[in-house]
Image (spheres, coloured by chain):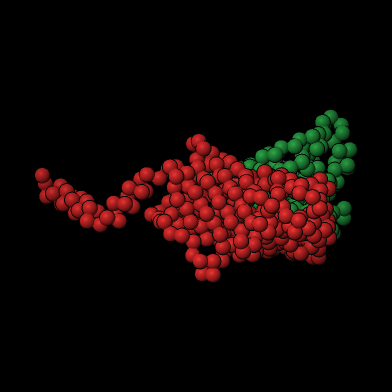
Chain colours: A green, B red
Amino acid sequence: MMSDNNALAARLAVGVAVAVGAISTVVWPQAVAHHSFAMFDSEKCRVVQGTVRKVQWSYPHAWLWLSVPDAERKQQLFGFEGGAPLELTRSQGWTKGTVKAGDKITVAYNPLRNTGNGGAFIVVTLADGKQLIRQGTRNACDGMPPLPR
Amino acid sequence: MSGVHRAVALAIALAVACCVLAPGCQQRSAANTALPDWSGAWLGNPMESFADFGFSPTAPDKHTQINPDDDSPVGRLPLTRAYKLELIRKRQTDQSMPGGMPSGTSMAKCIPPGMPAIMHHGSAIEFLFTPGRVTILIEDGEVRRIFTDGRAHPAPELIDDTVVGHSIGHWEGDTLVVDTIGMLPQAELFLDSGLNVTANTHIEERMHRRDTDTMQIDTVVTDPAIFTQPYRYTRLRPRSSQETFESQCMLNNRDTADGIDLSAPELSGTEPATPGAIQ
């Protein structure tokens, strides 16, 4: 399910405290990455739900590939770039098996500035509600709650 | 004494005798046991270095302004007029990238940053001590070989330049003093700065374990073409609770000159993705 943060906030307005952008945690900066992430718009946050098709636990950065149903219920493939595996492990304790193909997950991400289905993943919410947060400098996805399940 | 015990005693005696007769054996043993314990992975933090040259990795409009017509530093960098102009040119070039951020840098192309930039990187480093040499393994795959056997640098025309340069060192108590020259021109001064070293860049480092879990590295970089005076900085590297990782940048580098390669990998599962969905 695709949504932007405004739509998400509206959906969560009843009974849910939305704290978008309220948290700025600097533990392991994104700048450790090998490029600037300038191709992603850190001022915007979008959220999608879908099924993991592939996890590339790889360098320089990990990638998550997700099938996401569009408005016509057709599957769209999204690609999300994250930090280096060593960064994800050190900051959040991720391992290569934390997210697996077939998992139903929610991804809050900074979209690509150019066209394309994808972006930089910031918050990944697993089916059991556990959140994996890619910590870094202030980001529009900081504090983003998951979509209601 | 049993036969087995006699055989063991004889083997030990022979080993000791060999060491006594071979002076190098004794020296190496003494030297290695006298060295401090620097085991473990020591983390870096690039944010201090970004701050040093007034670079805001997520807010390009907050970059420190550069005035090439006076002696003011850029951040903490005492840059020469020529390098200020070079930095201005790099930033203007980078305006072609959304957000005005550096793109197409050496790092984005998986070219090793080299010295001194790699020591600003977030990659952890690991020290290995062997007789006459200290080796620094860096998680991005770069290796610094520091010769502590008393040799001098080769003559400049005899050095095969490398990204990490040629390093010699010596111990002053528990402090390792390192002198580095001979970097390739591709080696960067700072991560993502777009500024490179010259043939005359000289790096001096003093490394010591400040406490059990903190490595302190004091660095002085001199180069009259780059700096109006030596650029001095201190970095503290905390010891990681984890081992070092291997991070080979070329394995899945999707950076392109103007964005990201979103071509799909081989996918798992039976649920088909819409062909052409990926742009």
Q: Which residue: 51% across, 37% down? A: B210
Q: Which residue: 66% across, 40% down? A: A27
User: Residue B46's x, y, as percent?
Assistant: 66, 47
User: Residue A111's x, y, as percent?
Assistant: 81, 52
Q: Which residue: 47% across, 53% down? A: B169
Q: For residue B86, which quarter of the picture? A: bottom right
Q: Which residue: 56% across, 63% down? A: B182
| Horizontal relation, residue B241 to residue A117: left or right | left
Q: Nearer the viewer, residue B144 or B175?
A: B175
| Horizontal relation, residue A144 to residue B222: left or right | right
Q: Nearer the viewer, residue A35 or B221?
A: B221
User: Residue B151's x, y, as percent?
Assistant: 43, 59
Count all numbered tags in the image, as a single digit: 0
User: Residue A48's x, y, as percent?
Assistant: 79, 48
Work out whether B91 lies above or below B208: below
Task: Quadrant for the C terminus of chain A, please.
Answer: top right
User: Is any part of residue B80 visible from this angle?
Assistant: yes
Q: Nearer the viewer, residue A70 or B218?
A: B218
Q: Residue furthest bottom?
A: B157
User: Is any part of residue B103 visible from this angle?
Assistant: no
